[in-house]
Amino acid sequence: MKLDKKDLLLYAVTDRHWLGDRTLYEVVKESLDGGATFIQLREKNLDTAHFLEEAKELKKLCAEYKVPFVINDNVDIALQIDADGVHVGQSDMEAGDVRAVFGPDKIIGVSAQTVEQAILAEKRGADYLGVGAVFPTGSKDDADDVSHETLKAICQAVSIPVIAIGGITVENTPYLKGTGICGIAVISAIYGQENILEATKKLKDVTSRMVYEAD
């Protein structure tokens, strides 16, 4: 699957922390119904058998909505289920190594926090960058803050699409206007909400305005 910049408008990252009595499949379907344009499956503590089963189900679901589906960090599982791609952090496999394993047609996303990291990731074959944390966040223990000036500098330094991640909510999304990003990646702003469908719709509307409307 070739990446279209528009696919990155509202990038939803899964987290089973808020599931309660619902399944991950149900909440991801709700977010897709609400207009999520990209899904990343992020599992830090699931055993391989369950991870694999879940990934297969979600891949099928995303294909029905024609929405790209990538796996966070786990290159082996992404390969096994033939996911649309993978997202790796700075401490994971190098983008170049991932590209060598995946071939030219898969989507590779890389986390970056500096202009240097961003330029290197693009050079090594990344298709898009996730930059953050742009606001204080509770989702990642190791997320360093990235100033909006740095975010802007990264967008200007690379030719691949950039999305912002970290602490993003409906309320603070408009503050990212003018940075050059083509979308946002969120976890709790979708999956931590009571009404996921409505939360996703609202967030997509706010993000579209932030990205596409002129000042």
Image: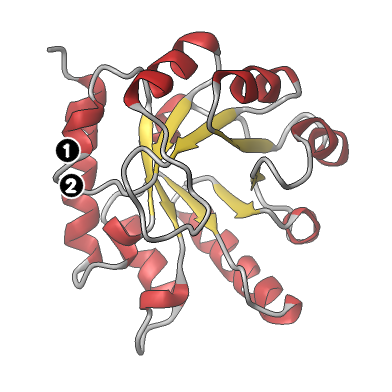
* Residue 59 higher or lower than 201, as above or below: below
Instruction: Judge from the rendering whether residue 183 lies leftward or rightward of residue 214; answer left or right.
Output: right
Q: Residue at x 26, y 28 (%)?
A: 176
Instruction: Judge from the rendering whether residue 49 lies leftward or rightward of residue 193; answer left or right.
Output: right
Q: Which residue is mark 2?
A: 170
**Label 1–label 2 contact, CB within 8 A:** yes
Identified by mark 1, the residue type is Val
Counting residues from the start of the chain, the first of labels 1 and 2 encountered is: 2
Q: Quadrant of residue 24?
A: bottom left
Q: Secondary structure at mark 1?
A: helix
The location of residue 25, given as percent across then percent down, is 46, 73
The location of residue 111, given as percent across then percent down, is 58, 38
* Residue 83 higher or lower than 177, as above or below: below
Identified by mark 2, the residue type is Val
Q: Which residue is mark 1?
A: 206
Q: Secondary structure at mark 2?
A: loop
Question: Alpha-carbon neighbours of circle 2 within 10 Å: few (<14), some, or many (≥20)?
Answer: some
